[in-house]
Image: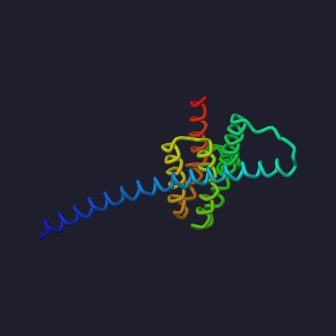
Amino acid sequence: MLEDLLIFLLWAAAISLVVALVAWLLLKWIAVRIARNVADLAERRIAATIEQGLSRTGVRIAGVSDQARRAKYLAEIDRMAWLMDRVIPLPIVGGIGLDSALGLIPVAGDAISFAISSFIVIRAAQLGVPESLISRLIAIQMTDLLVGAVPFAGDLFDVAYQADQKSAALVREWARLKK
């Protein structure tokens, strides 16, 4: 009887592990597709806005080079990471930001912080980072969201983890290697 229960529990654990792995892979694939689609949509809207502005005024504006756009996007990523994680400098931890402050609002604050931080993932997708890096950025942000949602301990985690700084560093490293 006890052996049958143990075998049942082992099978249930194995099946749960397989289902969790499949769900994780599926969610990762969906998240990468969403990030790419949002990035492509933003780029199309920017291009359409520039074209409309040119046709209305009749004035030709020099286009932004890829290097200038790349530098702009990297600067925006760095600025967002600073705002979310280090806007208020503190000794020892380096600083706290909007992420830690929003984390004080139970659950909703972490969701809002996640939404703001997803800007880094979108800009990274617009820069053309590989899907593996986008997956890693999403995993960092999801870790921050899920652990940050835990009362009190999550707030301390937000201060120490600094997900946006980690994400920005990964994108900067990718950009440095890409040169």
75 sits to left or right of 17: right
Q: Dividing the image into 4 quarters, which one contains the C terminus?
A: top right
Does 37 sit above or below residue 73?
A: below
Query: Which x, y percent locates residue 129?
Result: 56, 41
Does 106 sit above or below residue 143?
A: below
Q: Quadrant of residue 178?
A: top right
Query: Which x, y percent locates residue 162?
Result: 59, 48
Query: Which x, y percent locates residue 159?
Result: 60, 52
- Residue drawn at (62%, 41%) of the image: 127
Please name whichever residue, 104 or 166, is drawn nearer the observer in this view of the structure: 166
- Residue drawn at (50%, 58%) of the image: 147
Colouring scheme, one of rainbow, by chain, secondary structure, one colour: rainbow
Query: Which x, y percent locates residue 59?
Result: 87, 44
Q: Dividing the image into 4 quarters, which one contains the N terminus?
A: bottom left
Please name whichever residue, 118 or 29, is drawn nearer the observer in this view of the structure: 29
- Residue drawn at (59%, 40%) of the image: 171
Please name whichever residue, 116 or 126, is drawn nearer the observer in this view of the structure: 126
Q: Quadrant of residue 177?
A: top right
Residue, far bottom:
1
Does 66 sit above or below residue 104?
A: above
